[in-house]
Amino acid sequence: MHRTSDYDYDLPADQIAQHPAERRDQSRLLVIDRESGERTHRLFSDLVAYVRPGDVLVVNETRVFPARLRGRRSGGGEAEVLLLHPGEDESLWTALVRPGTKMRPGRVIDVSPEMSVEVVEVLPSGERVVRLRSALAVEDALARYGEMPLPPYMKREVTEDDRDRYQTVYARERGSVAAPTAGLHFTPELIERLQEAGVELARLVLHVGVGTFRPVEVDDPADHPMHKEWYRVPPEAADAVNAARARGSAVWAVGTTTVRTLESVADEHGRVHAGSGWTDIFIQSPYRFRAVDRLITNFHLPRSTLLMLVAAFAGYELTMETYRDAVARGYRFYSYGDAMALL
């Protein structure tokens, strides 16, 4: 059994992508044959050469929302709120608040003359329940005053371009505080080319939470408390996956979020069931994948549950060797970085 430290690797800071590629599908694509270990270096637009007619490409159509609010406390100091998910009343949200020590219930953060945030409750996890106060509808207030929640390893200010580029072209349903980044490489034209080649597109939702950035801090990954994320698998997506498997076609998961969703709803025989709920599935070696045959994914943080998932899919040695090769060849890493396809 591998320890958390086994998932470390050295990455020069200048290979952490700070901006997306000029064109989404012109990112690099590292193609790995899991059986032979062979690696091929392509562009993402070359994906068409690997997906076969009859295969199903499963995408996560969650939409990132401008979840970060910056403002000032009544005492004058700066404060920041990262909204995580709403309660039944959309004015109440679970959130992370900084500086946490000063933000007790009753404290207010003024975001603008039209919007403020009141701390209602401190949860045992350290998260807050906050109330959004504005005459505007929540959607409009966030669109006007919220920022896209770029990951902490992007050492720059958020720009207007990020509202478009830190979002997949097929994003539909608001709810994520981080993008399902493997999907950022697709363009409408590339999707059209795949569909014209006989590839079927299936859509599901998993709202990506802030836990996706949290490293595993315990020595034994099995002791890591996995975060929960909400998913929905529509009947048509389940039917498409099951039909593909029945005819011997491959099921391609676009991103680790899609893998986690499909594996959460697959039974022992690999049959995927429609439904919705919360999943805290933690996929690490050894694991028998039941619903996924191919994986498209970005390069992930050291010591992360996402890297552990990839290693469970491709094999530990091949994964870490591939990461070392990608570093040596100057691939760009993390959310706005390049991609890999595991065949």
Image (cartoon, rainbow, N blue to C red):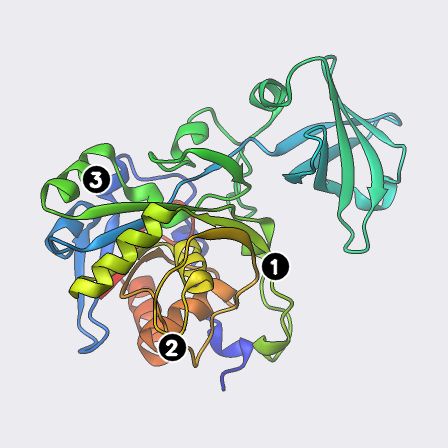
Residue positioned 85% across, 46% down in the render: 101
In this picture, residue 79 sits left or right of residue 254: right
What is the x, y in percent for residue 99?
79, 42
Relative side of 156 to 137, left or right: left
Q: Decide: marks 3, 2 in contact (CB < 8 A)?
A: no
Disc 1 + disc 2, Cβ < 8 Å: no
Q: Amino acid at mark 2?
A: Arg
Q: Residues within 10 Å of mark 1 (few under 14, many from 20)?
A: some
**Which residue, given by chain and number where applicable, does mark 1 sit on?**
227
Give the crowd class for mark 2: few <14, some 14-19, many >=20 residues within 10 Å.
few
Residue 25, percent across and down?
Answer: 23, 41
Quadrant for residue 83, please give it. Answer: top right
Expressed as whole percent of the image width and height from the top left, the position of residue 316 reads 38, 78
Label located before the other in sequence (3 or 2): 3
Picture coordinates of residue 249, whole percent (x, y): 17, 62
The image quadrant where one finds the C terminus is bottom left
Inter-mark Cα distance, 1 to 2: 21 Å
> Which residue, given by chain and number where applicable, does mark 3 sit on?
191
- Which comes sooner in the sequence, label 1 or label 2? 1
C-alpha span from label 1 to label 3: 31 Å
Q: In the picture, residue 92 is in which quadrant?
A: top right
Q: Nearer the viewer, residue 65 or 5?
A: 65
Q: Nearer the viewer, residue 253 or 158?
A: 253
Nearer the viewer's eye, disc 3 or disc 2?
2
Which amino acid type is shown beneath numbered disc 3? Answer: Ile
Q: Is residue 330 visible?
A: no
Q: Which mark is residue 288?
A: 2
Label 3 to label 2: alpha-carbon separation: 29 Å
Q: Residue at x 29, y 68 (%)?
A: 325
The total number of labels drawn is 3
